[in-house]
Amino acid sequence: MRIAFAAALWLLAAAAGAGEIEFSGEIGGKVDLYRETYRSGDLFEYLTDPDSYQEEYSSSVIESDATRASGVLGLGLDRAGSRLSFSAENEYAYGPELLRDAFEAEISWRIAPRRLLRISERLDVRRDVDGSLSYEQDLQHAASAEFRADSLAGRWTVRLREDISSSRVEDDSLGRVFDYDRNRVSLSLERRMRRGEWGLEGWIVHKEAPAGVNGAYREPGLKAFLRRRSDEAWYWEAEAESRRRGYFDASLAGAGSWSHEVRAIAGLDRATGWGLEFTDEMTLSRYDEPDEVYMDYLQNRSEVRGRLDLSERISTELAPAFEILEADAGQRYGELSAEAGVSLDIANEGWLHLSQEVGRRDYSGGADSTLSISFGSLDVSLQSSDYLFTTSSLMGRMGIGGGLAFEVYFDYTLEKHEGGDGDFSLLSCTASLSRRF
């Protein structure tokens, strides 16, 4: 499909007549760092005879880390026109372990006034270089086509859209469990008003999985939203969504489910440099035949986010939040957290954002926080323990002269459980130096 899409780009461009085409590129280097640590502790109960059990406690620390350096070369082209515009970009990344080739393209074609067709495609291929990876090739593909029609006055918009995606892992039997082909077709209607808008969207998703892998399903859904804004900088939004998932495999018939999500936002955005926003999100899931794995649950999260601009270049945020979950099989918790952040605009079109989140999750005590799963004569009891957590993140970009730019992303998450079992840490960092031309 990649060759056919590239050919279609040039054919449409030729049909639209001559136009100015701009070429661009990027060259640089990138370093990725990843480190994960997890301490597990599980209680196993073995049936030794018809009348007695034997308990065995297992605790272990699992660590994994990886550091990869690669050179990056990106080439792109753009054409903008009154009726047709398109862009295409190809990025190569080569390192001692991995070769990556990512291609992305998009066409926008105004067929008639207030009638627009947009087609896009992305292909991402990763290949093993030195045999150190568990697969020879990993391919991720996504494409979409959207037709948009606007009314004469511009108040009504109708969209018909199709999204397809697929994943393939070669020569890795375990990785093939995640292979899939997914297709989503949607139809939406939007109505704009003087102080807001409302809309409806319906869709159906069809997912196929490899032979012998459970996971193929069909999922229709419906979403409605309403947004309003006053002249006094007050605004509010409401959104509701429902989905019904049914699996094709008879062994997963009981895993069919209804899912409902509701989200409400109310806020105030003042031109004097401060704002306040309240968000509440609720998710309700009901399975046809709930069990220890597929559990009915109700989840609700509430957050208040405040913003204060200290100057034109410095902005701060503070967001306390509270989350609860009520599920079958005794899984219940309450979580209280707070996130603080600061954003800076720096010289040479640079920016920097730092945030820090801290919180605690408490499970209901006693047997209510224990999940028991049986495998024949083996019973596994998984204990959910209370824990503290913190997440630190940093993102930024800075120009350093000569057309060079330095970009960095850093994220560190830590969970500290009571008793130590379940302690978890995850560190990920990406730093790159590049030059655009």
Image: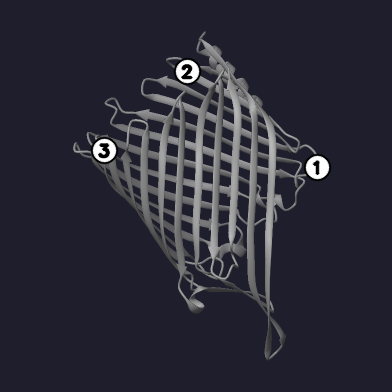
Looking at the rendered structure, the secondary structure element under dot 3 is: strand
Q: Nearer the viewer, residue 107 or 95?
A: 95
Crowding at dot 1, Cα within 10 Å, few <14 / some 14-19 / many 20+, comes out as: few
Q: Residue at x 59, y 65 (%)?
A: 422
* Label 2 packing within 10 angstroms: few (<14), some (14-19), many (20+): many
Of all residues, the one furthest to the bottom in this rendering is 51
Q: Residue at x 80, y 39 (%)?
A: 130
Q: Position of residue 148 (x, y in %)?
A: 41, 30
Q: Amino acid at mark 1?
A: Gly
Label 2 and label 1: CA atoms lie apart by 44 Å
Q: Secondary structure at mark 2?
A: strand
Residue under numbered circle 2: 84
Q: CA distance from mark 2 to mark 3?
A: 30 Å
Nearer to me, 340 or 136: 340
Q: Amino acid at mark 3?
A: Gly
Say which label, 2 or 1, has the lower sequence index: 2
Image x and y of residue 184, in percent: 51, 43
**Amino acid at pointer 2:** Leu
Q: Are marks 3 and 1 in contact (CB under 8 Å)?
A: no
Measure the alpha-carbon separation of dots 3 and 1.
56 Å
Of circles 3 and 1, which is in front?
A: 1
In this view, 68 is above or below 382: above
For residue 148, above or below residue 167: above
- Residue 248 falls in image quadrant: bottom right
User: Image quadrant for the N terminus?
Assistant: top right
Query: Is residue 430 among the parts visible in the rendering?
Result: yes
Residue where numbered disc 3 is placed: 196
Q: Is residue 393 depicted above or below 404 in this figure?
A: below
Quadrant in which the C terminus appears: top right
Q: Is residue 150 left or right of residue 55?
A: left
Q: Which residue is mark 1?
A: 131
Rendered image: mark on residue 372: none
